[in-house]
């Protein structure tokens, strides 16, 4: 076993040398060279939040990426999202009728299903990308409307001009199953108020893959954000719990809670140092060639988001920062502030334990790697002219002993 370990180490080092000398990016995560493929910079501090910008150790990524984002696609009208039962009204129909619906854990049976009809489903929406660019979707992004607000369950790429696809989602609005609109929109009307679910909710969708756990996390997050934003008089009347104020909001929707004026203001306050001067911050990130951040909340490193280039980071910046700020409002223990070395160690920690993989041949591959209390998710583009990791999420597991559930549609084949 020792000899095997030495051999594996030698192979890893050889690969690192090859990557460094050839300039080729090997897919697989943040730990790919002996000296680290990514370099962590000094943090930006904002209350309970520390954001460590991350740059490529080997220099800037020079190629242009072709993707549009969900917000951009919905705003332009080129991306449509609707309930599964309304899919017959969309243009291309192949692959929608006669496919058994997915049932999430703990869900009630769907209203009706046979080979000629498909009803609305809690964990499935239908999306069509009518644009001339591939669509990038990130786990944690919110679509509002329909019979429930939903959150995207995993990263994926939807080709330009694609057939309508089954979009795997989780409900983030327990208690409603009535239509508020026939179509879905993005999480906010104004880019400055854009948001996605905070890391603790995002983790339950990505790691647990369990609807009930997502609902539990949503309820807890809403209550804690309501408490953080409650007037001091309300908190005092509730004996310090703020429960009455949380109930007075009158919504179970994560999206509507984030749109509440008091919570939104509190999130903006928590994100103020990096949002009041957004353009200056992004300009500095561009100058440094930043492609991601390592996130610490109350001194604990909990998350990292990395993109293929600075442009994609800047286009998701507002959404990401506001989600991190929301997380900083929730309860938890405080720790000593982490150093740059701590953030670098988190990023460089090996991710080569248990692996699951899925994807779409010639479009993307999505991998999930678990090792030593962390989980890494890698979205690799396989579209012509790409073949690189578009987005990487790395998170600290809150329950490292929990078994990994396989992705919804597991394809064992190789996607190249």
Image (tube, rainbow, N blue to C red):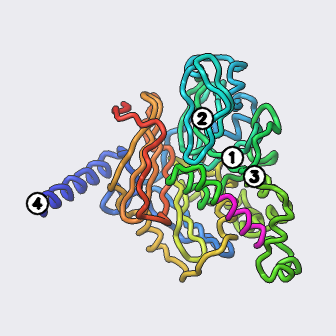
Q: Nearer the viewer, mark 4 or mark 2?
A: 2
Q: Nearer the viewer, mark 4 or mark 1?
A: 1
Tell me the number on the disc at residue 167: 2
Name the foreground residue: 407 vs 99. 99
Q: Is residue 286 visible?
A: no
How far apart marks 4 and 2 lie (CA) works out to 45 Å
Q: Which residue is mark 3?
A: 255
Q: Residue at x 39, y 63 (%)?
A: 348
How far apart marks 2 and 3 lie (CA) works out to 19 Å
Q: Residue at x 51, y 53 (%)?
A: 208
* Mark 2 vs 3, N-terminal side: 2
Identify the image quadrant of the N terminus: bottom left
Q: Which residue is mark 1?
A: 142
Magenta region, residue range: 217-228
Q: Position of residue 16 (x, y in %)?
A: 28, 53
Q: Nearer the viewer, mark 3 or mark 4?
A: 3
Is 242 displayed left or right of 286 in the figure?
right
How far apart marks 3 and 4 lie (CA) works out to 53 Å
Q: Is 221 contained in the magenta span?
A: yes
Identify the image quadrant of the C terminus: top left
Q: Secondary structure at mark 2?
A: strand
* Mark 4 vs 1, N-terminal side: 4
How far apart marks 3 and 1 lie (CA) works out to 8 Å
Q: Residues within 10 Å of mark 3 (few under 14, many from 20)?
A: many
* Mark 3 vs 4, N-terminal side: 4
């Amino acid at each position: 076993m020792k000899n095997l370990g030495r051999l594996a180490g030698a192979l890893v080092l050889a690969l690192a040398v090859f990557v460094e000398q050839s300039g080729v990016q090997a897919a697989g995560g943040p730990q790919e060279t002996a000296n680290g493929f990514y370099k962590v910079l000094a943090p930006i501090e904002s209350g309970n939040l520390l954001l460590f910008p991350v740059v490529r150790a080997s220099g800037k990524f020079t190629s242009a990426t072709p993707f549009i984002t969900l917000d951009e696609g919905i705003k332009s009208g080129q991306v449509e999202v609707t309930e599964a039962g309304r899919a017959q009204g969309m243009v291309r129909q192949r692959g929608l009728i006669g496919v058994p619906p997915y049932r999430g854990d703990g869900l009630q049976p769907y209203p009706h299903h046979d080979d000629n009809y498909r009803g609305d489903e809690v964990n499935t929406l239908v999306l069509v990308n009518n644009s001339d660019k591939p669509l990038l979707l990130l786990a944690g992004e919110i679509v509002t409307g329909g019979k429930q607000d939903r959150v995207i369950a995993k990263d994926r790429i939807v080709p330009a001009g694609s057939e309508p696809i089954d979009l795997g989602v989780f409900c983030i609005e327990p208690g409603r199953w009535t239509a508020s609109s026939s179509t879905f929109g993005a999480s906010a009307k104004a880019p400055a108020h854009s948001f996605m679910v905070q890391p603790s909710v995002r983790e339950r969708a990505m790691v647990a893959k369990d609807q009930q756990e997502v609902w539990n996390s949503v309820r807890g997050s809403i209550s804690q954000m309501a408490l953080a934003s409650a007037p001091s008089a309300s908190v005092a009347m509730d004996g310090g719990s703020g429960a009455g104020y949380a109930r007075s909001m009158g919504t179970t929707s994560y999206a509507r809670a984030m749109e509440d004026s008091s919570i939104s203001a509190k999130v903006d306050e928590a994100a103020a140092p990096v949002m009041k001067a957004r353009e200056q911050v992004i300009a500095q990130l561009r100058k440094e060639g930043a492609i991601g951040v390592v996130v610490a909340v109350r001194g604990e490193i909990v998350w990292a988001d990395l993109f293929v280039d600075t442009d994609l980071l800047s286009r998701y910046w507002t959404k990401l920062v506001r989600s991190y700020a929301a997380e900083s409002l929730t309860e938890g223990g405080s720790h000593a502030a982490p150093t740059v070395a701590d953030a670098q160690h988190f990023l460089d920690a090996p991710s080569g334990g248990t692996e699951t993989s899925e994807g779409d041949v010639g479009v993307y591959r999505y991998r999930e790697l678990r090792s030593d209390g962390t989980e890494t998710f890698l979205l690799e583009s396989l579209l012509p002219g790409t073949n690189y990791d578009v987005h990487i999420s790395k998170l600290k597991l809150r329950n490292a002993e929990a078994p990994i559930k396989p992705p919804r549609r597991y394809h064992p084949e190789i996607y190249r």
